[in-house]
Image (cartoon, grey):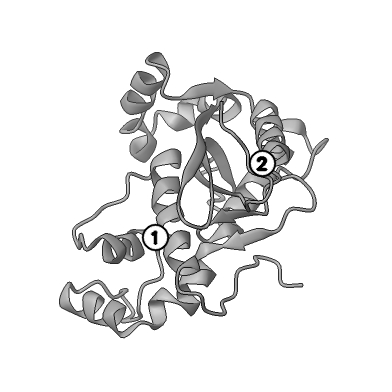
Amino acid sequence: MTKIDRRKAYYLTLDTETANTSKSNMDDPMVYDLGYAVHDKYGNIYETNSLVIADIYCGERELMKTAYYAEKLPKYEKALANGDRKMVSLLTARQIIKEVCAKYNIKAIIAHNSKFDYKALNQTLRYVTKSKYRYFLPFGIPVYDSQKMAKDTICKQSMYRKFCEKHNLFTRTGRLPENAQVLYAYITNTPDFKEEHQGLDDVMIEVAISTKCFRQHKSMKKLLFAR
């Protein structure tokens, strides 16, 4: 059992993978994969979990069989079979997150481009419960955006710009990238790194990014919702 140090600040980083339930409206992300890790600002991991959301993964099965998602299904089925992932309802996932946040007295919930994950989780909850419940994350816990954090720290480093120039990693519009894949490639000096685009795998990348940001000991924007 993990021994919790009440003097320590714990964070919960999460990542979602989503599908769209409507072909005519691609702005309705529905969460079928939710991964999370509890960690401190130094990158030490205390708990992880990988949750497959039955309401979408099973309930929207025809959607999950299509194109992009179909390629992922064998990996998910294998992981579910060997216990590396857990199949739960969305409401159970919501309760798990609530209990973990209480257990560790989570200081902040972190995601890269957290606006997307925040919206996707809320929208899926409202879809599944017909708006009986509207907010997925526990009330009162700040939400941090590691993309904002990186923009104010890592992305300002000359070495980061040189890395992107050397490996031709700028965006299509010629801007310095702020996405998790390139930031992690820089941190680990692996220019050919590619994200798995699976919840818990991407969470570990995002933990490394926020850890790198915290280590800069510089002022940075963190909050998804500025106070």
Looking at marks 2 and 1 on the same chain, the residue that comes earlier in the sequence is marked by: 2
Q: Residue at x 61, y 61 (%)?
A: 144
Could you tell me residue 19's position as x and y percent?
50, 41
* Image quadrant in which the C terminus is located: bottom right
Residue at the spot of label 2: 104
Q: Looking at the image, do the residues carrying marks 2 and 1 touch, with CB atoms under 8 Å apart?
A: no
Could you tell me residue 7's position as x and y percent?
67, 51
Name the residue nearer the viewer: 155 or 1: 1
Q: Residue at x 20, y 59 (%)?
A: 190
Q: Quadrant of residue 196?
A: top left
Amino acid type for the residue under numbered disc 2: Tyr
Name the residue nearer the viewer: 100 or 33: 100
183 sits left or right of 119 in the view: left
* Image quadrant in which the N terminus is located: top right
Which mark, residue 93? none
Could you tell me residue 78's position as x and y percent?
34, 19
Above or below 39: residue 145: below
> Marks 2 and 1, Cα distance to the nearest angstrom?
26 Å
User: Which label lies toward us, 2 or 1?
Assistant: 2
Mark 2 element type: helix
Amino acid type for the residue under numbered disc 1: Ala
Residue at the spot of label 1: 180
Above or below 27: residue 150: below
111 sits left or right of 165 in the view: right
